[in-house]
Structure formats: structure tokens, C-alpha cells
């Protein structure tokens, strides 16, 4: 099916991106990706990319056969495809794994859709790709769109509770350290859930606040009927452009300072931190191994190690690993062989995921999964779903998770404080 496409000049001082977001949220199925002006190493290909309406779609409520289904969908459509992979697709990658913890959100295990309309927005232009509708009509509709008032009546929100008490969190970190001492693992990502029940969330307004607060390069609003993802992620999982694969794991977090002088001190502390550098290099090694399973021999390299990147609320230690994809490796197989991302599991990966299931109290679901898209040419770009609010509007259940890498040198109290630092943006939005 051929898409109609047209590029439109945007007037100076326009608010087209904001209107496009508001317009997109009225659709039952929608994905909005915002790079927030980041360019180059940690930016997206587009300042903003959105997709609405499902001309066709796939969804799975369990994990078995997910990647094979996605591969068939990509091959059949050869078009723009947007969607997500939940963390629990680990069970499709490694059948001995399972996910039995509590899940209050209930996102399907996998969802991808072929959009009716795709809109690509830059600073001065918007390109519209449409399967059926006239592109001029779509452009005019977005330009004139005005967000209707929220139907929700403001009232005090219920309290947000931790699924794990502070004392239990500290005890669990010590138990994980014992696994490391015994040689079961070298590092494990441990997360906790914060949740609220009977929470009436205006998801549109909440995403605007979260996006303004975080201004992250892989921010995402995803709507699947009554379920919402509001994501302010700074991390890329995996990107394919031509035959090049790019992964950018994050390990190492430091708060921002109150002024430029304090920022400079904290930035240097993060860069020199032995613990953070150790965490980062372990995951870089894991990612190198993951990419080597799909890439030409000798092509996998670390283009940047321990890059310190500044975001609105934190500094992050980011490394960039690349490789050249073997010509006979399907793009979906490259994703499968690297999934889930090492920064959210640990090393060795499979044993870490077994321990994550044993020690965490909440099913991760879409948290620490990935959202992204395929292009008609077979390229793709996927983020890591962190710094995110998930919401089930029917059940009025709200959830967000945060955590960090536990290594033998970890101090339990400091790990707990780091998880709260990462959750800070979500608490602010929901305050």
C-alpha cells in the first residue's frame, strides 16, 4: 500500500508540535516520540515523530512467539510500524524464564501497529505520510486543533505507596551482594514500584509536565486504548541505520547541582567514580557480546566509553557501542539477540533475570522494555522505558518504577537514595 506524502513549511513562531501532540492523543492508538532538540550522539533521527490510527496491528497477551510474529509483520508490511516490547519478552528469548509477579497495569506483552498517519516534524517543516487521507486536510486539521478541557474533576489524589518498604529494599540489596560474593552474578539491576489506586490521571497534562521537566531525548507518549505510557527516557536501547547497529547503555547517575560551579564538581565526581565506571564497563562488555551475535566479525567497537551527558535533573554516564550488521541477519533478530537491554538486567544476563524475578515484587511489563519504530526501509530506533509513568485508566491504577545496578561495592542506603533520585521527576509531576 503506497502512502501519500507531502512536506509543509511551518510558519515562524509556530506551535505545530504542541498542536500535533494534542491532536494525536484523541486517537485510541497513538505513539508520540519527542527528541526535545537533542541532536547527534544521543538524539533521534527526528525532532518529533508521531503515528496515529491502526490500519493493521499485532498484539500478544503472552510472550511466546512474540519475535517471530513481529518479524512476519515487518516483512509483510514493509512500512512505518510503531510499537513496544515489554521487558517480559525475555521469556520468548529464554524459555526457561517466567514472569509471575503482580501486574496492575496490564499492557499486552507486545503491540505494534501500521499507522494510518505518520507525521515527522523538524524545526521548520512537517512531513505527513498518510495511507488514505489527503495530507493537506491533515495538516490543516493539526494546525487548527485545540485541546478540549479535561473531563476529570480536580480533587486530591490518593497517596503514592512503595511496593517495597525501605527496610526490605535495604535487606534485598544485601542479599543480592551475597549472590555476587558467591559468583552467581557480577551485577544486577534491582527495581521497586511506586503505585496508587483509584487515581484519576489526566494523562495528557501529566505527559506535558513530565516532558517539560525532563526534556529527555527519547520521550514517549503511547496510548493503547485505556492504557498509557508517559516516558521521559534518556536512554537508547538499539538503533539500526543502514547496516550499522548502535546501542547506548546508561550506567551511572549523579544529581544536578544548584549552579554551574556545583554542576562541574558533580560531573567530575560521576566521571571519576570507580563504582559507576565499574557498572558501566560491565554492561558495555555485555552489550558488545549481544551485538557480536548479529554483527560482522571484528566490527563491534566502543565508540565512546564513560561519556558524561547533562540532562535537566541528572548527569548520566553513557557509553556507545556499534557494529556492522551481517547482511543475512533480519533486523528483528538483531533486536531479539540483544533483548532485554543489559543496562536493565545485569551480568550474566539470564541468571540476573532469574534473580530479578525472585527479588522484585512487581512484574515489569512495559517498564524497562522498549518503544520505537521501523521505517519502510527496515531501519529502526528503540528507547529504554525508564523514568516513566504507566496508567490503566479503566482500573485507575497508576505505577512507576525506579532502581539501579547492584554490584558488590554497592552501599544499600545509597542505592535506595539513587532510586528515589530517578523517581524524582514522576513524584514532581504527580504532586
Image (cartoon, rainbow, N blue to C red):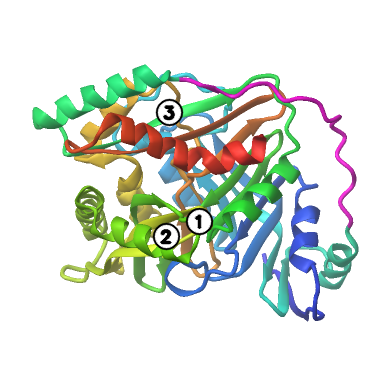
- The residue pinned by badge 3 equals 192
Q: Is residue 31 magenta?
A: no
Q: Mark 2 against mark 3, which lies toward the viewer?
A: 2
Q: Residues within 10 Å of mark 2 (few under 14, many from 20)?
A: few
Q: Residues within 10 Å of mark 3 (few under 14, many from 20)?
A: many
Q: Where's residue 153, x and y in %? A: 86, 29
Main secondary-structure element of the magenta-colored stretch = loop
Specify which label sits upstream in the sequence, 3 or 1.
3
Across the whole image, how many numbered discs are drawn on residues? 3
Q: Tell me how far mark 2 sits from mark 3, CA to CA.
A: 30 Å
Q: Tell me how far mark 1 sits from mark 2, CA to CA.
A: 6 Å
Q: Tell me how far mark 3 sits from mark 1, CA to CA.
A: 28 Å
Q: Where is 76 relative to 398, above or below?
A: below
Tag 2 secondary structure? helix
Q: Which mark is residue 262?
A: 2
Please give the name of the residue rendered at 67% of the width and 55% of the height, measured from the top-left corner.
115
- The residue pinned by badge 1 equals 258
Residue 23, quarter of the rendered image:
bottom right
Q: Where's residue 268, x and y in %? A: 31, 62
Tag 1 secondary structure? loop
Q: Quadrant of the N terminus?
A: bottom right
First to last magenta residue range: 146-163
Left or right: where 267 falls relative to 229: left
Whether residues under marks 1 and 2 lie with C-beta atoms below 8 angstroms apart, the answer is yes
Q: Mark 3 against mark 1, which lies toward the viewer?
A: 1
Q: Where's residue 73, x and y in %? A: 52, 51
Please give the name of the residue rendered at 49% of the width and 59% of the height, measured from the top-left corner.
311
Amino acid at each position: 500500500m503506497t502512502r501519500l506524502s507531502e512536506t509543509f513549511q511551518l510558519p515562524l513562531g509556530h506551535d505545530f508540535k504542541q498542536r500535533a501532540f494534542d491532536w494525536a492523543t484523541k486517537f485510541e492508538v497513538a505513539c508520540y516520540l519527542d527528541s526535545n532538540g537533542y541532536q547527534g550522539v544521543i538524539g533521534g533521527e527526528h525532532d518529533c515523530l508521531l503515528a496515529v490510527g491502526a490500519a493493521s496491528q499485532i498484539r500478544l497477551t503472552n510472550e511466546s512467539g512474540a519475535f517471530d510474529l513481529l518479524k512476519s509483520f515487518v516483512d509483510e508490511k514493509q512500512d512505518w510500524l510503531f510499537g513496544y516490547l515489554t521487558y517480559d519478552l525475555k521469556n520468548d528469548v529464554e524459555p526457561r524464564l517466567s514472569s509471575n509477579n503482580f501486574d496492575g497495569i496490564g499492557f499486552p506483552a507486545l503491540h505494534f501497529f501500521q499507522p494510518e498517519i505518520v507525521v515527522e516534524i523538524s524545526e521548520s517543516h512537517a512531513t505527513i505520510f498518510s495511507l488514505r487521507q489527503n495530507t493537506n486536510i491533515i495538516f490543516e486539521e493539526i494546525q487548527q486543533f485545540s485541546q478540549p478541557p479535561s473531563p476529570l474533576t480536580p480533587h486530591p489524589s490518593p497517596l503514592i505507596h512503595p511496593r517495597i518498604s525501605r527496610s526490605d529494599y535495604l535487606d534485598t540489596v544485601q542479599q543480592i551482594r551475597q549472590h555476587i560474593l558467591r559468583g552467581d552474578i557480577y551485577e544486577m539491576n534491582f527495581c521497586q514500584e511506586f503505585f496508587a489506586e483509584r487515581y484519576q490521571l489526566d494523562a495528557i497534562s501529566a505527559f506535558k509536565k513530565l516532558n517539560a521537566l525532563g526534556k529527555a531525548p527519547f520521550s514517549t507518549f503511547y496510548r493503547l486504548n485505556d492504557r498509557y505510557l508517559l516516558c521521559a527516557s534518556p536512554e537508547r536501547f538499539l538503533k539500526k541505520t543502514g547496516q550499522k547497529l548502535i546501542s547506548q547503555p546508561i550506567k551511572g547517575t549523579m544529581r544536578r547541582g544548584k549552579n554551574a560551579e556545583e554542576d562541574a564538581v558533580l560531573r567530575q565526581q560521576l566521571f571519576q567514580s570507580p563504582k559507576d565506571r565499574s557498572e558501566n564497563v560491565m554492561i558495555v562488555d555485555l552489550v558488545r557480546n549481544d551485538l557480536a551475535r548479529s554483527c560482522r566479525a571484528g566490527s563491534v567497537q566502543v565508540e565512546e566509553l564513560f561519556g558524561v551527558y547533562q540532562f535537566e535533573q541528572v548527569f548520566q554516564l553513557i557509553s556507545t557501542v556499534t557494529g556492522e550488521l551481517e547482511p543475512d541477519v533480519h533486523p528483528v533478530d538483531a533486536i531479539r539477540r540483544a533483548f532485554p537491554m543489559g543496562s536493565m538486567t545485569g551480568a550474566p544476563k539470564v541468571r540476573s533475570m532469574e534473580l530479578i524475578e525472585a527479588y522484585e515484587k512487581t512484574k515489569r511489563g512495559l517498564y524497562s522494555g522498549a518503544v520505537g519504530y521501523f521505517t519502510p526501509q527496515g531501519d529502526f530506533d528503540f528507547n529504554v522505558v525508564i523514568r516513566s509513568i504507566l496508567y490503566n485508566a479503566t482500573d485507575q491504577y497508576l505505577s512507576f518504577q525506579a532502581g539501579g545496578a547492584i554490584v558488590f561495592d554497592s552501599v544499600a542506603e545509597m542505592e535506595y537514595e539513587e532510586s528515589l533520585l530517578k523517581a524524582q521527576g514522576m513524584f514532581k509531576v504527580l504532586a
